[in-house]
Image: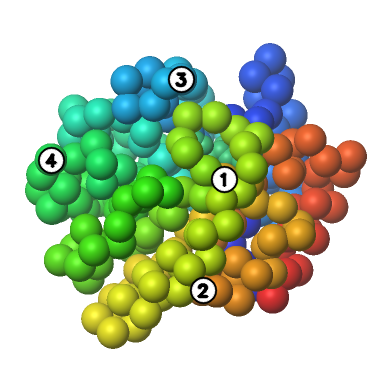
């Protein structure tokens, strides 16, 4: 069964308590929290104060996705805010290896995200040091976009790299995940499915989370 991580980017920002109630009382495993800086991506979302406030009322795992330039400036702040896993973009890190060590030293799990165009070769010398590879299946910055089909091939290639190197990293898919493509993603090798609009725009979000969770 996949790990289901609803993205709060698609929640009603005037009523985050209802998003918490939904996730806490559902089969969702993680919160996926999208932090955007208006520089690495052309959009600004929310940051550590919002995440810290959410964490006080939540009991589940916080998967924080930093779409931010020079994320090393904020790693400690996100640890304090309650991040369990901190994902940085390979494209945003000149010293990615150093950033990975920093996040681990702070006591968080570490993920590396790749934009749709980014070749997987940049993972070659870090794959054994990370907990998660986040493959972007849309261009980061916005929710509600269409899934990019070449992601399937990329998942299979990353899975091969993980197996060949005996890495314990798992693969997360972020962007355009639906009930229609969820099974194919899991079959290709994905373990974590992020879902924003698919969950929060559903008629019955709790049932949608259960349906995604039941995919295998
Ligand atoms: C996009 C974000 C995603 C987004 C996914 O930049 O990283 O996590 O919230 O939203 P959906 O599931 O609606 O594509
Ligand atoms: Zn995300």
Check residue 94 in the rendering and tell me which mark sits there, or answer none: 4
Residue 161 against residue 97 in the figure, above or below: below
- Does label 2 or label 3 sit earlier along the sequence? 3
Percent x, y of residue 134: 42, 54
- Does label 1 or label 3 sit earlier along the sequence? 3
Residue drawn at 42 percent across, 21 percent down: 42
Crowd rating for badge 1 (residues with CA inside 10 Å; few <14, some 14–19, many 20+)? many
Number of marks: 4
Question: Helix, strand or loop at disc 3?
Answer: loop
Q: Label 2 vs label 3: CA separation? A: 30 Å
The residue where tag 1 is placed is 175
Q: Is residue 93 left or right of residue 38?
A: left
Percent x, y of residue 41: 39, 26
Residue drawn at 20 percent across, 67 percent down: 124
Image quadrant where residue 182 sits: bottom right
Residue in the foreground of this view, choosing between 103 and 71 = 71
Percent x, y of residue 126: 19, 63
Q: Label 2 vs label 1: CA separation? A: 16 Å
- Does label 4 or label 3 sit earlier along the sequence? 3
Quarter holding the C terminus is bottom right
The residue where tag 2 is placed is 189
Note whether residue 64 is visible: yes
Question: Helix, strand or loop at disc 1?
Answer: loop
The residue where tag 3 is placed is 43
The reply to whether the residue tagged 3 has its Cβ within 8 angstroms of ligand 1 is yes
């Amino acid at each position: 069964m996949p790990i289901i991580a609803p993205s709060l980017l698609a929640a009603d920002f005037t009523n985050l308590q209802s998003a918490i109630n939904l996730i806490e009382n559902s089969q969702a495993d993680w919160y996926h929290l999208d932090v955007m800086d208006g520089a690495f991506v052309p959009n600004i979302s929310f940051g550590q104060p919002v995440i810290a406030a959410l964490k006080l009322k939540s009991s589940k795992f916080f998967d924080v996705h930093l779409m931010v330039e020079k994320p090393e400036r904020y790693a400690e702040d996100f640890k304090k805010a309650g991040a369990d896993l901190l994902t940085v973009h390979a494209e945003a890190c000149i010293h990615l290896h150093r950033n990975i060590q920093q996040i681990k030293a702070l006591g968080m799990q570490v993920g590396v995200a790749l934009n749709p165009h980014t070749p997987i070769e940049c993972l070659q010398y870090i794959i054994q040091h990370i907990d998660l590879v986040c493959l972007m299946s849309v261009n980061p910055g916005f929710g509600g976009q269409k899934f990019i089909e070449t992601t399937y091939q990329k998942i299979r290639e990353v899975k091969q790299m993980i197996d060949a190197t005996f890495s314990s990293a798992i693969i997360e898919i972020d962007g355009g995940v639906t009930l229609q493509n969820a099974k194919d993603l899991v079959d290709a090798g994905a373990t974590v499915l992020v879902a924003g609009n698919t969950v929060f725009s559903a008629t019955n979000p709790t049932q949608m989370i259960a349906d995604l969770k039941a995919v295998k």
